[in-house]
Amino acid sequence: MKRKITEHLLKWKDTPGHKPLILQGARQVGKSYILEEFGRTCYKNLVKVSLDLVPDVRDFLAKKIDPMEIIAFLESMYNTRIIPGETLVFLDEIQDCKRALLSLKYFQEQHPEYDIVAAGSLLGVAINNEESDEGRFSYPVGKVDELTLYPMDFEEFLWAMDKDILSENIREHFATNEKMPESLHNQASDLYQKYLVVGGMPESVLKYRQTQSYLASREIQQSILAGYDKDMTKYSSPATAVKIRACFNSIPAQLAKENAKFVYKVLKEGARGRDYEEALQWLDDAGMITQLFRANPPRLPLRSYEDFSAFKLFMHDVGLLGAMSDLPPSAVLEGNAVFTNFKGALTEQYVLQELLAAGASPAYWSSERGDAEVDFLLQGAEAVYPVEAKAERNLKAKSLRTYREFFSPPRCYRTSLERHRIGKLTEDMPLYAVGRIVEETGSRGLT
């Protein structure tokens, strides 16, 4: 299945003097698959080293760290010549070998002509784990290039569903500002509803594509969640694992509240922030959550005004959120009235991951009295833009009006199931085109 990150990988390959590349992201988002495809299609040869499965390489690296000795060893072991510019060396599950991570530093300093990529689902956890059997990991800061792979966004989902032309039509509409035909709008909106159920985890998307079964897709999601639960136990102490699991499992309940700000007492009566800092950091290092911090006042640069004591906690995939919540697919697809309250949480989750996948780093805003809240803030080059995530066709946005009166942004954005409309102060963005907001505001990579 086609992924946008391939363009970034090609740009890395074509950049003279590039450093070794580390591709980060949560487990099961497709890191290994995309790097293997990149190696097979863009190089003459690929040498993939699965460090969790090949003890011989780990044993060798325990004794030798010289780049040319490593190259000679891998050539012999995999019976493949490693030629600069023609061969890609892929170190998979690099968190299982501290010395492999260290070797990237020496490749960059001594032999940058070799193309080396690495991936590790729990690399962040390993780096911060002082109890590692190999000792504390030393990350090669400044010696590697980095990319992050997120779950498939909605446009990638369209590609996977063989809806490339619909995707092109959506892009053409926003390039020309011509009115989107209602038939295409309805088709895109219908596929958006399906995406809320299937989500963006590649295996779940593939299973749905093959079977057209939401239940088959849900089985994949439950399997992924079970794997995450095992990771929590395997890669942390028993006491910390209990807290990690409590934080992660509380996300649906936290988001379902009228005020979705993370509240520790949902975890345990009398719980305090300092008791769960390590657990939240573990989940963040594993790429399984996003902490969205409150920024007040919403000024440039946003990071300087974030309040780290006030945040919302999201998962990294909307389909996994539905699976964790035991949400019946029919409730999403048919608009079950009982589901109305949680639909707002599901929509916020979707909008956030679309913004992240598009390259933004959002925050949110709420008034000091707590009587007004804007779901997302995006930092542009010269202004902060508010984004209100609406789940249905109701476009009433009292908080957005309050924000506009206080801070006079040059433009406000509001997502919904309505068609695209540009008003005097507010632009209504259909939910299937959330990524366009990042392009319009120029907020990619600025925060």
Image (tube, rainbow, N blue to C red):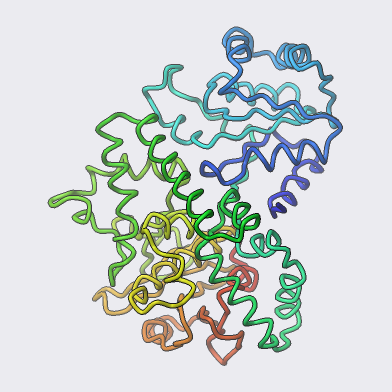
Q: Is residue 13 above or below residue 294?
A: above
Residue at x 70% of width, y 87% of height: 181
Residue shown at 46% from the left, 44% from the top: 223
Q: Position of residue 188 (x, y in %)?
A: 63, 75
Residue 333 vs residue 257, the one in the foreground: 333
Outermost residue toward the bottom in this view = 424
**Residue at point 79%, 43% (across, down):** 15
| Quarter location, residue 51 | top right
Q: Of residues 308 and 130, which is closer to you in this image?
A: 130
Looking at the image, residue 211 sits to the left or right of residue 263; the answer is: right
Residue at x-position 72% and y-position 70%: 167
Q: Residue furthest top?
A: 63
Nearest the eye: 306 or 1 = 1
Count of numbered labels shown in the rendering: 0
- Residue 152 percent location from the top left of the image: 60, 56
Residue 320 figure quarter: bottom left
| Residue 228 position within the rendered picture, expressed as x and y whole percent measured from the top left | 42, 41
Q: Does residue 63 lie above or below 115 as drawn? A: above
- Left or right placement of residue 351 versus residue 277 in this view: right
Nearest to the observer: residue 31 or residue 136: 31
Q: Position of residue 329 (x, y in %)?
A: 46, 65
